[in-house]
Amino acid sequence: MAKKNKEKRLKIALIGYGAISQMLFDVFKEKKPPIDIIGVLVRPGRAKATRKKVGRKVAVVEDLKSLLKLKPDVVVEAASQQAVREWGETILRKGYDFMVIATGAYGDPRLWKKHKAAAAESGARLRLPAGAIAGLDGLLAMRLGKLERVKYTSIKPPHAWSGTPAETDFDLPSIKVPTVIFQGTPADAGRLYPKNANLAVTVALCGAGLKRTEIELVADPTLPPGTNASRLEVVSDSGELRLERLGKAMPDNPKTGVLTALTMADDLMKMVRSSDW
């Protein structure tokens, strides 16, 4: 009898060690897929504290060169738009797959084209998980026809918009009813609300583009505690889609939904599954 080949394990390296990265560690520990987190890139001065949390088997580094020396199969950004802008092109040009969740950085079409070109030249893949939304599979299919209208609405409690322009334009603690705090383009939403509205750009890139996608951001004090919500509306020649989502926010970060980390984990697990499901 032929000897069974040893199971190939996926090696991933994380940029950032916040709520998303911590949840990835937890999910992989519980579900036990053939995936190993081999390294984490953190800001200078944070390595010692991070090592205590992740254990000895995970390398903790403070520069990209050291992270890439680990030879990961995928580099996973779980940090910020700045990390995407600063390191994305280098990662892709060197041939490493790059998973991006801070897609608001691609509100800059020049950066989007540059990263796609870098991936095409090296053979790497730019991986873009859905994040805290559902329905992108339908939108991607519908764009093969004619999209007549795409609107994305992000709904979060008032305190989740603290530290954003909304804090200047509105008295957030005094909001008593659902209030629109932003209407505009995906690029402006991603730029002005970099920790809240990356999905505005994700929806645009999956559908009608940066110029033809409507974005609305809402502060809603009537949401159940610890949740946020979103709404996706699509009208096309193949039909219409209307999807509403209510999800839990990260316990320590009301700006980010739990589903964000779960879609990242699922996309990585698809790479080691024998079927799409």
Image (cartoon, rainbow, N blue to C red):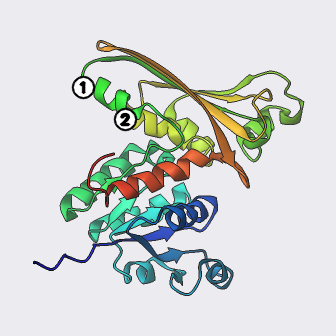
Q: Nearer the viewer, residue 84 or 13?
A: 13
- Nearer the observer, 177 or 112: 177
In front: 14, or 118?
14
Q: Position of residue 50 (x, y in %)?
A: 64, 78
Q: Callout 2: helix, strand or loop? A: helix
Q: Nearer the viewer, residue 107 or 229?
A: 229
Mark 2 sits on what residue?
206
Query: What is the C-alpha distance between the residues marked 2 and 1?
Result: 11 Å
In the image, 242: left or right of 42? left
Specify whether 96 is left or right of 48.
left
Residue 211, numbered circle: none
Q: Position of residue 31 (x, y in %)?
A: 48, 61
Q: Amino acid at mark 2?
A: Cys
Residue at x-position 89% and y-position 30%: 174
Q: Is residue 272 visible?
A: yes
Q: Residues within 10 Å of mark 2 (few under 14, many from 20)?
A: some
What amino acid does circle 1 point to?
Leu
Q: Position of residue 64 (x, y in %)?
A: 45, 76
Residue that mark 1 sits on = 144
Where is residue 235 shown, x and y percent of the image? 40, 14
Question: On screen, 204 above or below 30?
Answer: above
Q: Residue at x 57, y 37 (%)?
A: 189
